[in-house]
Amino acid sequence: MRTPHIYTRQPLAVGMTITLEESPARHICQVLRLRPAERVSLFNGNGQQYGAILQSCSRQNVEASIVSVTKSQAEPPLHFTLALGISKGERMDYALQKAVELGIGCFVPLFTERTVVKLKGERMERRLAHWQNVAIAASEQSGRSCLPVIERPQPFDAWVAHARQGTRLILLPSATQSLNTLAPPQESILLLVGPEGGLSGKEIAATEACGFTAVKLGPRILRTETAPIAALAAMQILWGDF
């Protein structure tokens, strides 16, 4: 059986015995139903995974002793950033969850002209915390030990003007190029996908002015939550570790 992979915000080192926070403790006891002497894998986002043995396991207290440390083998050779037009809750959650499983290192939610979701103040903070929890759960499930950066939602115009890192791609059904016609990227990939309804003509023109390359994924038009997953999987096959 696969060793459970659990995130904690605490510093970790071999020889330490730690008391886990409420959320991972509840997951270990009530969901996984683990018992003392069973093994878990712990990570705190630094790229290492720590083998640990449970010392106590109750609803009030879960303690684990760290006995080993290894470097994570789950990170892709390229750094992927996904910039995604903000869409309705379930669609956004699905895209983020699967993108983390596929290896993204950064997630950028964007307010675009056709974004219908309104986020500000306390509601934005709740949604940002929710996305961070989605990323943690996806990292646990996929065995990753580096948490992707979840950036604060930001306006498209301000973001695109400063998007300069690596190979910059935008998914457009009208594009003439496909991923397999591109030269292999050397360092990092920035993938931009619009919200429901797509990006406006003005926004597409802005990406062209900022050096983005438009690519398409075959003859079919994919949903906003499907397109980034298909593209990331294809890029992992072409240039990554699939």
Image (cartoon, rainbow, N blue to C red):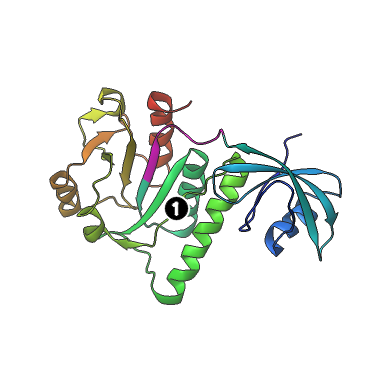
Location of residue 28 in the rendering, given as x and y in whole percent from the top left corner: 76, 53
Q: What secondary structure is marked by label 1?
A: strand
Which residue is tagged 1?
149
The structure residue drawn at horizontal position 57% and vertical position 52%, both measured from the top left corner, is 136
Which stretch did the figure color magenta? Answer: 73-81
Is residue 49 on the magenta stretch? Answer: no
Residue lying farthest to the front in this orientation: 15
Compared to residue 58, the image places residue 98 above or below, namely above
Amino acid, disc 1 = Val
Q: Nearer the viewer, residue 142 or 185?
A: 185
Compared to residue 234, the image places residue 102 above or below, namely below
Compared to residue 125, the image places residue 17 above or below, namely above
> Would residue 21 be visible to someone looking at this image?
yes
Q: Kindly indicate the quadrant of the structure image that contains residue 150.
A: bottom left
Location of residue 194 in the rendering, given as x and y in whole percent from the top left corner: 31, 50
Judge left or right: residue 161 versus residue 180. left
Q: Nearer the viewer, residue 207 or 197?
A: 207
Q: Residues within 10 Å of mark 1 (few under 14, many from 20)?
A: some
Judge left or right: residue 230 versus residue 67. left
Judge left or right: residue 163 versus residue 109. left
Count of numbered marks: 1
The structure residue drawn at horizontal position 30% and vertical position 30%, both measured from the top left corner, is 185
Q: What quarter of the picture does the N terminus occupy?
A: top right
Q: Nearer the viewer, residue 220 or 161?
A: 161
**Dominant secondary-structure state across the stretch colored magenta:** loop
Location of residue 228 in the rendering, given as x and y in whole percent from the top left corner: 39, 41
Location of residue 35 in the rendering, given as x and y in whole percent from the top left corner: 86, 49
Residue lying farthest to the bottom in this orientation: 121
